[in-house]
Image (cartoon, rainbow, N blue to C red):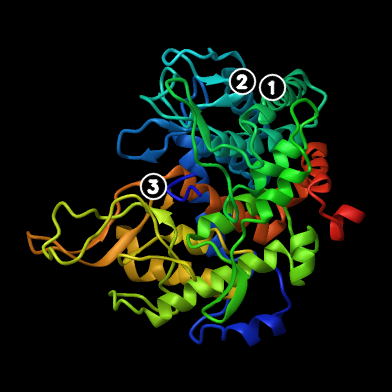
Amino acid sequence: MRVTRSLLWMAAIGFILCCKAPSREIAATKDDPFLDSLSRDTFFYFWDLANPDNGLVPDRWPSPSFSSIAATGFGLTSYLVGVERGYVPREQAAARVLTTLQFFQHSPKGEADTGITGHRGFFYHFLDMKTGLRFQKVELSTIDTGLLMAGILSCQSYFDGDNETEATIRATADSLYQAVEWDWAMDGRETMSMGWHPERGFLEASWDGYNEAMILYILALGSPTHTIPAESWNAWTKTYQWGKYQGQEHVNFGPLFGHQYSQMYIDFRGIQDNYMKNKGLDYFENSRRATLANRKYAIDNPMGWNGYGENVWGLTACDGPGNDQNANPNVHFTGYHARGAAQWYVEDDGTLSPTAAGGSVPFAPEVCIPALKEMQRLYGDRLYGKYGFKDAFNLSIQFQDGRKGWFDEDYLGIDQGPILLQVENYRSEFVWKLMKKNKHIVEGLRKAGFTGGWLQE
């Protein structure tokens, strides 16, 4: 189960029974100026920083960086939000999308270990920002290709005009998606391999649940050219870990990104597979419970870290201070790491990330929006800058030079995406509505056994 990279509706009464709302603030209205500025600032991370020559989005900024193909997928969908919100004209967004899609379509592919971008429809996890070629010895990534394809299909559904640019976007998107050999990536197993190296073949690890890979399986099941068996979904759900944590019964997965990524694109409210039917809930509610459990862990703060509380919380995969300058040799602070809290998984070194709350806004706005507001209010430009929230902070570390507390200098593309897209889903359901129109997503859900709700309409 990979957790180093790479995601909830109920009635208000049900929410109140599960977790008392913060006393100092209530959730913002959907036209709140705070959400306006957060959305706009976060959008421009993708718009300003993508390479205009190939559309690749950097993994991070301002530190020099390779491109993340997952962040590029999030960027593709962010451009659509930008058009809807009036940040950029539709024609400019369409041109940027077409540049990106044509780069992937025409990039060099094959079994070679250098000078290539992808193989069998998949692409390498990280690519050189300028050349677009494989970065160092990274893997051909199944999940990151899946997230890229989710972004590509969002553009296919959005650009429905009859002009040449938009018609080419639709055709290129379909060609890229149909080229992905999901069946090959199963490697003869019941669950999909996490990746492949030209130097040594498939990774031993496969996508066992529950984590961010729901979107991966749904895309693979929906493929008209390289589909995988319907039984693959049941094999995936057999590995779930159901348990009660912080008063919440749900399928556990510690870092919140695992509860967010798939639901950035798919509206799981009211639709259920066989597993969730047996549990009497849906994946949206499951993510709501995970969000509330994550917050409750921070309120309890069993390790006694500085700053944790009802409106300062959020454990997920993110940057961290590392331990190079740690003045206390008895405490280990990690760098980039999958922090989280669940029944069988607690990874907590005092580092919090705003994307944990930002990516869960639709699930529990009553607690997530006040947290975002409070973190901005308390920490100002140390945490919130040109492109919205920086990636992470830790108030417990003390450095040898006397400094106390650590605030990341970088923004991370895979953490900016959940903030922007999930805030938009909360405000307008834009991405959810868009993906309901995509026949590949619908087919994948139905093949996985999902029924009810909007799938029956």
- In space, the residues marked 1 and 3 are separated at their CA atoms by 32 Å
**Where residue 300 sits in the image (x, y, percent)?**
40, 82
Q: Nearer the viewer, mark 2 or mark 3?
A: 2
Question: Looking at numbered disc 2 in the image, what kind of residue is underneath it?
Answer: Arg
Dot label at residue 179 = 1
274, above or below 313, in the image: above
Q: Name the residue rendered at 48%, 47% in the picture.
A: 2
Which type of secondary structure does the marked residue at label 1 adopt? helix
- The quadrant holding residue 354 is bottom left
**Where residue 185 sits in the image (x, y, percent)?**
62, 30
- In space, the residues marked 2 and 3 are separated at their CA atoms by 31 Å
Which quarter of the rendered picture does the C terminus lie within? bottom right
Check if mark 2's residue and mark 3's residue have beta carbons within 8 Å: no
Check if mark 1's residue and mark 2's residue have beta carbons within 8 Å: yes
Q: In the image, 137: left or right of 228?
A: left
Question: Looking at numbered disc 3 in the image, what kind of residue is underneath it?
Answer: Tyr
Visible in this render: residue 39? no
- The quadrant holding residue 312 is bottom left
- The quadrant holding residue 278 is bottom right
Q: Name the residue rendered at 41%, 75% in the picture.
A: 298
**Residue topped by disc 3:** 411
**Residue topped by disc 2:** 120
**Where residue 117 sits in the image (x, y, percent)?**
50, 19
Question: Looking at numbered disc 1 in the image, what kind of residue is underneath it?
Answer: Ala
286, above or below 442, in the image: below
Visible in this render: residue 329? yes
